[in-house]
Image: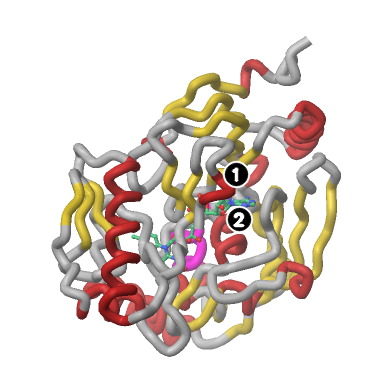
């Protein structure tokens, strides 16, 4: 019996991952699973765990670079309505981790719910945003997370209070867990005030970042006391190209992929930027994006 038996209807084999990411590059997932319930997901995770099959979760794919060789394991995509529900109790929401962050955050702001203006214009699912503790200079989503329901890598269900998530600068304690539901607690204010703050932050983002291009947002984290974009810019790297990958002219911490770009082009450009910034500034840039290397090469990834 195959470990995926009974779930064939929801599991696609050799599924291209590029179109499911913002970079639009990379190879196939050996298995792409779109579960229709948490129970089925738990069962499949349990079996994959027993068989030693590597597992990844793909949200909106806005912070993931899939290698050209693809991912030889199980990729989970939570886009079934079962993972996209939202229920409210006063200013507290139980939000499915497959919910799209952008429309959700805008709607909250329009209703005078304070807390998600800091992620205005950030492409994500709720799960991906919490895993990455998405945000910017105006704050981070972690501020309003109270608890989460998740599946452990072996498929067992768990509830974690926010403190256990250890949310930090684009980091969390979530590694091979699957976030299912998040409890978010908002403050309330005048809808006009919250909404105008949201739109202002959204406009700022549109003016300074190449949001219409194929990218994964900021490639590198800001080293303490520095802006990675400025370090890259002053190292003279804006416009630098490797194959179909280019350092954005609008924001030097963005790599933009053209139609002919490969994951290898992007990885080579990342490597080049890291070397040049080190030569110019003596600083090592740490990747913010999650690179899905072929299994076996992950140990050498930074
Ligand atoms: C144009 C653009 C602008 C951006 N601007 C910003 C910004 O201003 N601030 C910012 O912080 N980020 C920004 N980003 C990066 C990206 O939007 C965030 O990192 C976002 O949180 C990624 O969410 P996602 O759903 O796309 O996750 P993915 O990219 O799909 O995944 C990211 C990580 O989260 C994991 N993951 C996803 N869903 C789950 C889940 N349910 N359970 C467990 N793990 C999960 C994945 O396995 C992966 O490790 C930008 C990206 C783009 C393309």
Whether residue 77 sits left or right of residue 2 in the image: it is left
Residue 90 magenta-highlighted: no
Whether residue 302 sits left or right of residue 65 in the image: it is right
Q: Secondary structure at mark 1?
A: strand
x, y percent for residue 101: 50, 59
What number is the disc on residue 57? 1
Is residue 14 or residue 107 the one in the foreground? 14
x, y percent for residue 5: 73, 15
Is residue 173 or residue 211 the one in the foreground? 173
Q: Residue at x 40, y 67 (%)?
A: 220
Q: Residue at x 37, y 82 (%)?
A: 196
Q: Nearer the viewer, mark 2 or mark 1?
A: 1
Asked if the beta carbon under badge 1 is closer than 8 A to the nearest atom of ligand 1, the reply is yes
Whether residue 170 sits left or right of residue 238 in the image: it is right
Q: Secondary structure at mark 2?
A: helix
Q: Is residue 94 above or below residue 267?
A: below
Dominant secondary structure of the residues highlighted in magenta in the image: helix
* Structural crowding at the residue carrying mark 2, measured as other residues with C-alpha within 10 Å and reported as few (<14), some (14–19) or many (≥20): many
Of the numbered discs 2 and 1, the one sitting upstream in the chain is 1
Spatial CA distance of label 2 from label 1 is 9 Å
Magenta part of the protein: which range? 100-107
| Image quadrant occupied by the N terminus | top right
Is residue 184 or residue 247 the one in the foreground? 247
Q: Circles 2 and 1: CB distance less than 8 Å?
A: yes
**Colour mode?**
secondary structure
The quadrant in which residue 68 appears is top left
x, y percent for residue 110: 46, 73
Whether residue 17 sits left or right of residue 88 in the image: it is left
What number is the disc on residue 127? 2
One can see residue 209 in this view: yes
């Amino acid at each position: 019996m195959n470990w995926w038996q009974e779930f064939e209807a929801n599991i696609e084999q050799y599924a291209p991952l590029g179109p499911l990411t913002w970079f639009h590059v990379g190879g196939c997932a050996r298995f792409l699973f779109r579960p229709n319930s948490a129970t089925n997901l738990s069962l499949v995770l349990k079996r994959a765990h027993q068989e030693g099959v590597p597992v990844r979760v793909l949200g909106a794919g806005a912070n993931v670079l899939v290698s050209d060789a693809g991912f030889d394991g199980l990729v989970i995509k939570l886009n079934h309505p079962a993972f996209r529900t939202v229920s409210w109790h006063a200013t507290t929401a139980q939000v499915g981790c497959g919910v799209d962050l952008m429309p959700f955050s805008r709607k909250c702001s329009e209703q005078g719910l304070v807390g998600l203006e800091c992620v205005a214009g950030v492409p994500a699912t709720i799960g991906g945003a919490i895993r990455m503790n998405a945000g910017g200079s105006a704050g981070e989503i972690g501020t309003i997370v109270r608890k989460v329901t998740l599946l452990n890598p072996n498929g067992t269900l768990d509830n974690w209070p926010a403190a256990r998530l250890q949310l930090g600068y684009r980091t969390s304690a979530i590694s091979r867990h699957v976030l299912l539901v998040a409890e978010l607690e908002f403050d309330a204010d005048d809808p006009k005030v919250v909404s105008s703050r949201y739109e202002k932050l959204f406009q700022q983002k549109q003016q300074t970042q190449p949001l219409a291009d194929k990218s994964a947002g900021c490639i590198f984290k800001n080293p303490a006391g520095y802006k990675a974009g400025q370090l890259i810019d002053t190292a003279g790297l804006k416009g630098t190209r490797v194959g179909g990958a280019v350092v954005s002219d609008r924001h030097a911490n963005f790599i933009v992929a053209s139609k002919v770009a490969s994951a290898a082009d992007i990885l080579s450009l990342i490597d080049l930027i890291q070397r040049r910034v080190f030569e110019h500034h003596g600083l090592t840039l740490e990747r913010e994006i999650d690179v899905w290397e072929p299994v076996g090469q992950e140990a050498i990834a930074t």
